[in-house]
Amino acid sequence: DQGAVTTIGPQPGVFTACHGVWEHVRHRTFAYTSMELISDLGGTLVGYLKVRGEYTVDNTGTEYTGASFAQVVAVDGTVLFESAVTNAGERIQLP
């Protein structure tokens, strides 16, 4: 609710926790940008993962759809990989 994003990466020690920001852009739509640092197994920084996207929450507030764009970037700024994805999700409900 404060506009911050934090997640834990898939492989601690190689990917840092993801940190980012989000903001309301219109009606039920929110934009975000997040970043993770990437190191080799020895702990040397080799690049970062940057993901940005936009999500729209449905009228009930329990489902969303959106699109994201991810880039893996080397420390010298060279883009090593990029991918656009669309996704959807649903809030976990108590029985």
Image (cartoon, rainbow, N blue to C red):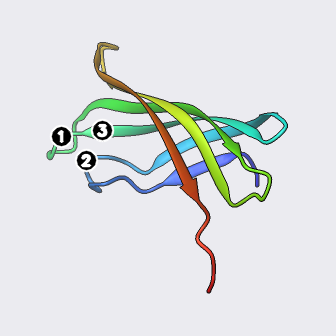
Q: Where is residue 78 in the image (x, y as percent from the top left)?
A: 29, 13
Q: Residue at x 41, y 40 (%)?
A: 36
Which residue is nearer to you in this view: 20 or 27?
Answer: 27
Residue 95 in the image: above or below residue 87: below
Q: Split into 4 quadrants, where in the image is the N terminus?
A: bottom right
Outermost residue toward the right? 27
Is 71 on the left-hand or right-hand side of 35? Answer: left
Q: Split into 4 quadrants, where in the image is the C terminus?
A: bottom right
Q: Quadrant of residue 32?
A: top right
| Disc 3: which residue | 38
Q: Are marks 2 and 3 in contact (CB under 8 Å)?
A: yes
Q: In which quarter of the image is residue 72?
A: top left
The answer to whether one can see residue 88 in this image is: yes
| Disc 2: which residue | 14
Secondary structure beneath dot 2 equals loop
Q: Tell which circle, 2 or 3, labels the residue nearer the N-terminal end.
A: 2
The answer to whether one can see residue 74 in this image is: no
Q: What residue type is labelled 3?
A: Ile
Q: Position of residue 76 (x, y in %)?
A: 30, 14
Q: Which amino acid does label 2 sit on?
A: Val
Which residue is nearer to you in this view: 13 or 71?
Answer: 71
Mark 2 neighbour density, 10 Å: few (under 14) some (14–19) many (20 or more): some
Residue 41 in the image: above or below residue 80: below
Q: Which amino acid does label 1 sit on?
A: Asp
Mark 3 neighbour density, 10 Å: few (under 14) some (14–19) many (20 or more): many
| Disc 1: which residue | 40
Is 2 on the left-hand or right-hand side of 35? Answer: right
Q: Distance between the residues labelled 2 and 3?
A: 5 Å
